[in-house]
Amino acid sequence: MSALEQLYQQVILDHARERHGEGLIEVGEGAMAGESFQVNPTCGDEVTLRLRLDEAPDGGAPVLADLGWAGVGCSISRASLSIMTDLVLGKDVREVDALAEDFRALMSARGEPLGDEREERLEDAAALVGVAKFPARIKCALLGWMALRDASAKALVGEAPR
């Protein structure tokens, strides 16, 4: 195992243990918020993700102000959720969507680095590049990202969390 692979493995293990963003957030009445429940039928991993968007001060795209998640799953899905939380908080929804597309591209690359600025934008999420070598684990890594996309869409159309 190369030094880079060892570093990536350590990043994943650290996030799987620390789980940034774990715990569902409370959203106030009338908040621009969304919630999504996703399950990976292949392995049984599941997550509920709740987020709150705030209007941008400059009138631009809404900003992902807070998010939290609860679920059960393997270290890959929990690490991916933790890394994703750190990466997207404070970004506007257009940036969040672009990061999600970059991450999907990484998972489609079958373990090969993207080799461009997308990988830099992904920060610690690039550590999950090796997961893409194992097709059964790709869904684990994407689970939280799918919940993020769904919850964001619900928040933008005004579908309140339950």
Image: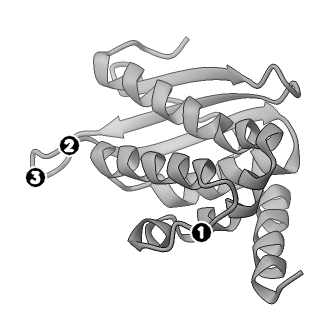
Q: Is residue 113 left or right of residue 102?
A: right
Q: Tell me how far mark 1 sits from mark 2, CA to CA.
A: 30 Å
Single out the residue that lies furthest toward the left: 59
| Residue at (39, 48) in percent of width and height | 96
Q: CA distance from mark 3 to mark 1?
A: 36 Å
State the mark number for residue 113.
1
Query: Which residue is label 3 attached to?
Result: 58
**Above or below, 36 relative to 67:** above
- Residue 95 relative to residue 108: left or right: left
Asked if residue 94 lies left or right of residue 14, the reply is: left
Name the amino acid, label 3: Asp
* SS under mark 2: loop
* N-term-proximal mark, 3 vs 1: 3
Q: Which residue is mark 2?
A: 61
Between circles 2 and 3, the one closer to the viewer is: 2
Residue 127 image point, x, y percent: 68, 67
Residue sitting nearer the eye, 96 or 35: 96
**How many residues crowd around disc 1 within 10 Å: few (fewer than 14), some, or many (20 or more)?**
some
In depth, the one of 79 and 48 nearer the eye is: 79
Q: Which amino acid type is marked by label 2?
A: Ala
Residue 87, x across and y down, in percent: 51, 59
